[in-house]
Amino acid sequence: MLELIKAHQLNLMLFLCGACGILIFLLMHTRFLSKNRKRILILMELVALLLLWFDRLAYLYAGVPGRTAFYMVRISNFAVFFLTSGIVFGFNLFLSDCLIQDVKPDSVPFILKLVQVLSVIGMVMAVFSAYTNLYYYFDETNKYHRGSGFLIAYIVPVICPILQYTVVRKYRKIFSRLIYVSLILYIFVPIACGILQVFTYGISIVNISMVLVSIGLYIFTYLDINDTVEHAHEIEIQNMQDLQQKVLKEFDRTIMGLVSEIEEKDGLDKGNAILSAEYARKIAEICEKDEEYCQKVYYATLFRSIGFSNVMDKVIDLKEDEAKDMQRIAEVSCDYVHMTTAGEDRNPIPDYLAREVLVREAGEKYDLAFANLMVKIIDAQDTGGFSDVSTVESEISCNKYRDHISNGIEITAAEKKICFECKNGSVSQEISGAPSIVLFDSIDRRVHNDEKIIREYDYLEYGEIWFDGHYVATAARKIKALGNVQKETADTVGSYKEKSSYEIRAVRFEDHIRIKMTGPEYSNEMIIALPDKTKSSYIGLTGEKCEISDIKIETEDEEIKADIIPRIVTETSYIDSLESDIKNVQIDRFRSAASEGIELTGKIRILFHSMSLPSANMIWHCPSVVIYYSKDGNVFGPEYREYDLIKLNGEEDGDKEYVTNRFKMKRKEEFPGWELWKEINKAGLDYEVSVYKKGNRITVKTINLGIELENTTTVMDDPDKVYVALTGDQVALTDIRLK
């Protein structure tokens, strides 16, 4: 390595001199350093430049005869020894300036003062040596030779940096990481090279190292400036953002007060404007719009809701495309909130009815994309439009039979255990009473008696059961008691005024429910056969002249298997017909079943007969096409990834994680209208779907009853195989053929 440097050191010196010159120019135009710090760094780089320049001249003229060489070799060597101490002097000024600016001591530390004196002495000794040959001398050919006091020249460049290091170490916390590293390099690299220089000859590794660390000091200082400026900029940005947030909060507080005042003054539905604006913002966020856009659409919808359309126009800057999109978003969110909230002139409708309106009008009254996004938000909420549907009261009081019925407790394949205390008899009457249960299904999980509400919430009552084994079957196909009702021993029966413990265990598999009811006097177990598998099932606690309290509900971790509940009626099937290429499939509830998977390798046509089940009453109770991957080729199989779900009523639910989907829906002139569309689907309809795979793109096309659908799915995770299958919601799919 040393031989390589020795061979090319003159060129290296010239290059480093040029680098120092460039740094001097840059420092002169640097704005983020203090004037004093800038002057010191310019001095240090200038000394480094001159040091290497004269050192290079000393090598060039060494051993060269003539008067010019005589003077140049002596001037150059004097300058080298003089400027070596000058570099220590400049670095000392740099350290002193750092301490003065950052620590602000009463005076410069004594050690730095001592170094300052020693570096000046070193420069004086360089002058003295030039006349006494202490450090070096020249022969008659102008060749350089070390003098008897040569090692004295290394006292300043070796000892002084060690003294400077003690100061750097003491005040290390004031230096940034970058500056601290550069100071350590500046101190110890020349020391190491100085020690090495004692044992080498004909190579100026000390001077080269001093220039290199001087350049490094500038570079690290520059990087530190960048970090400091960037940090200051971040602080400034954060302060501006904080200020902006404060302004927005104040603006928001003012606007909310204005909205509330206008709602009260003009008799508007209280809270609807804010709720509409929040849904509008959510739609914009799903569309991956930036924060400014989301903020604009929020306030634009807010003003639209209270009738300030002119203010809305100003909020969205009257940019044509942006304005139209914001108006479409606002229309969807405002109409949804209006439909699902109560007002002075209307009752709210449940989410599933509002959903149907949005699906019906998508592409007509409402923008197709934004209506579909609002539908997805509704599906994600999954509350039926009521915030407390999953809440069951902790206690209820019943005087007349069924004058109070708890919210529904859902019966699922995971067994429910319902425990409660019951005090029989009323406060005013000495008449014994008893609790009972109502089995039902309803969108809002409540029991209803009003005919209009029964229709709106799709209410269906299966029957009523008492703890003593009595029951009334209404919509249930059959209720069967398992064995005789067991009467408990007399000592377990308490007074009608004392509290007694009751327990209900309920579990469901497909269209059968098993319920075991245990009270202080009786216990019984029953099987209930539901009309079909399509409906949900809930237990409502009620009774007559009793007070029910301490209601607790527990759910088992595991779901039951098929053979746990004995079947008491035959299974209702709508697929008992001839099968074609693929087995028939009955889908009783949303995606409760699916056809066999069909591997996509090119173009395929899927033809099948679809019939909506008798319980189907919504637009989306129809077939769907699912594009997916799984290890075994089955829907929801191992390593399942779903790429797209296309409902043939015109809805699309693609997964953005693995794919991009481009969906188009159009209602042609032959579209019969939704009511007739539902009737035809109930009667039965032949469908045809074309699926084409090319590379990682899958295109699905279909035209059925005037609804034209086209969706292009681009798969990004490059699976080995892609499959298509048929599924849906409350439909029977038969005669499935592939062409």
Image (spheres, rainbow, N blue to C red):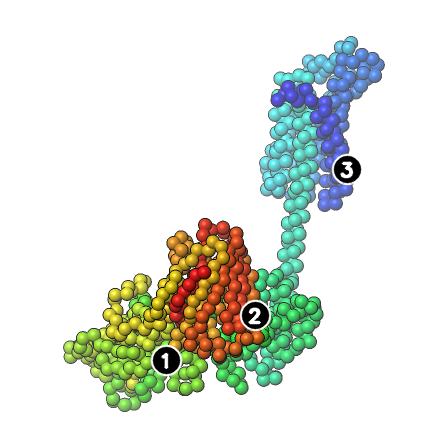
Residue 72 appears in the rendering: yes
Q: Check whether the beta carbons of the residues at disc 3 and disc 2 lie within 8 A of each other.
A: no
The picture places residue 346, in percent across and down from the top left corner, at 52, 84
Q: Which residue corresponds to the image point at 64% horizontal and 27% vertical from the top-left?
A: 190
Number of the label disc, if any, that sits on residue 357 = none
Kindly identify the amino acid type of the residue bearing the numbered disc 1. Leu
Q: Foreground mark, 3 or 2?
A: 2
Quick one: SS at disc 3? Answer: helix
Kindly identify the amino acid type of the residue bearing the numbered disc 3. Phe
- Residue under label 1, please give it: 460
Q: Is residue 337 above or below residue 282?
A: below
Q: Is residue 65 above or below residue 127?
A: above
Q: Residues within 10 Å of mark 1 (few under 14, many from 20)?
A: many
The picture places residue 734, in percent across and down from the top left corner, at 39, 68
- Residue under label 3, please give it: 25
Q: Which residue corresponds to the image point at 74% horizontal and 13% vertical from the top-left?
A: 143
Q: Earlier in the sequence, mark 3 or mark 1?
A: 3
Q: Check whether the beta carbons of the residues at disc 3 and disc 1 lie within 8 A of each other.
A: no
Which quadrant of the structure image shows residue 71? top right
Q: Check whether the beta carbons of the residues at disc 1 and disc 2 lie within 8 A of each other.
A: no
- Residue under label 2, please give it: 666
Viewer-proximal residue, 204 or 146?
Answer: 204
The picture places residue 304, in percent across and down from the top left corner, at 63, 76
Which quadrant of the structure image shows residue 30? top right
Q: Is residue 653 above or below residue 225?
A: below
Q: What distance separates the C-alpha of mark 1 from that of mark 2?
A: 35 Å
